[in-house]
Image: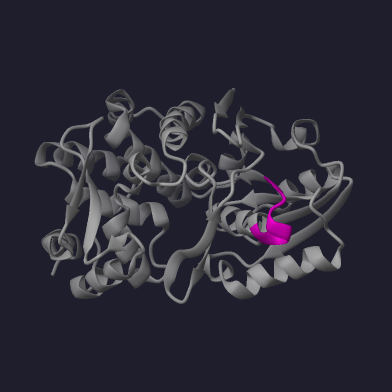
Amino acid sequence: MKLTVNLPQSAYDIHIGSGLLQKAGELLNLNRKVLIVTDEGVPPEYAAQVAAAAKTPTLVTIPQGEGSKQLPTYEKLLLTMLEAGFGRGDCVVAVGGGVVGDLAGFVAASFMRGVDFYNLPTTLLSQVDSSVGGKTAINLGHIKNIVGAFWQPKKVLIDTDTLKTLPPRQIASGMAEVIKMSLTSDAELFSMMEAGEEDYATLIARALQIKISVVEQDERESGLRKILNFGHTIGHGIESVGDGDFYHGECVAMGMLPMCGESVRARLLPVLTRWNLPTGCQMDANAVYAAMLHDKKAQSGKVTVVKVPTPGSFTLETVEPETLLPGIKELTGN
């Protein structure tokens, strides 16, 4: 299956299917120097397949987790490219989840003012979320994704076979993003998930069609693309305070609940439960609130939030941050 992202300066294809890593040499231009970035949590044979297809591969395996999405690792990758004599005609390939994709994409965006980037996401979360849209970034201090650039990939390969090696919690985390996009933009997809649809290729493609449509209309998040932040405002606060206790998708799942109308929330709760996603957590509400205020989406003392009154629809509302505190308290039980 192939989807196409049509952007004015950088159209690219997304291939979805089984066994695509084995076809990397056919689908990607690897006849040059190739920096392959993966992490210790990714089965090593995935990156090895890409390296075997590259003319001059340089494989770097970084530690697993958000701790790698920082300036020291970013500098290490840039120095690796510099020392290996990479030029503007060479490329970077990410083989892994969102951390690897965000980091490698930012390296590609900034080395010699930009080289080709290929994204081969291996987690469900990265396949339906960060694989499309060109948002690359690293963390600074305790703030997620605060330093980065928009840099579109040349191509994305989504090999559904990689999901077979993922633990159930990782699958659930990715499914939170599918649920998120269905709620704002595709009532039929949400109904499919209520009915128990579990065909991953179908769910990934439906979710990506939503995100592609949004990105094509708003490449740099000046308007419509803000709907992709549904669940993220409070979710990022939970993620920051949790400091690794919860996966990103789990935080988004919780962050969606206060932003839904009562009837939507009643339908959403059993869907989250079916996918073993959390519907609350034990945290200090004021700490979550403070972390939320540090998020880059808070502007001029106010924050723009996405709310869902009915499945398949959304509203963008600019509100005083303190109006979100009751919802945070409900989630955190205090």
- Tell me where residue 239 appears, x and y as whole percent: 36, 64
Left or right: 274 in relation to 125: left
- In the image, residue 271 sits, relative to residue 201, either above or below, namely below
x%, y% of residue 76?
71, 71
Q: Is residue 111 magenta?
A: yes
| Along the viewing direction, whichever of 153 and 87 lies nearer the viewer | 87
- At x 86%, y 63%, the residue is 84
- Taking 189 as reference, is 289 above or below it? below
Q: Nearer the viewer, residue 119 or 153?
A: 153
| Observer-nearest of 262 and 305 | 305
Q: Is residue 65 magenta?
A: no
Does 297 sit above or below residue 20? Answer: below
Q: Quadrant of the C terminus?
A: bottom left
Q: Position of residue 249 (x, y in %)?
A: 39, 51
Viewer-closest of 79 and 88: 88
Q: Which residues are magenta?
A: 110-117
Q: Position of residue 283 (x, y in %)?
A: 24, 71
Q: Residue furthest right?
A: 55
Residue, x 19% and y 60% (percent of image)? 331
Question: 11 left or right of 266?
Answer: right
As drawn, 331 above or below 75:
above
Residue 116 in view here: yes
Determine the image quadrant of residue 160: top right
Q: Residue at x 46, y 47 (%)?
A: 168
Q: Quadrant of the N terminus?
A: top right
Q: Residue at x 58, y 40 (%)?
A: 164
Left or right of 202? Residue 50 is: right
Task: Give the colouring mode of the picture.
Answer: one colour
Left or right placement of residue 42 versus residue 85 in this view: left
Q: Is residue 283 visible?
A: no
Q: How many marks?
A: 0
- Quarter where residue 69 is shown: bottom right
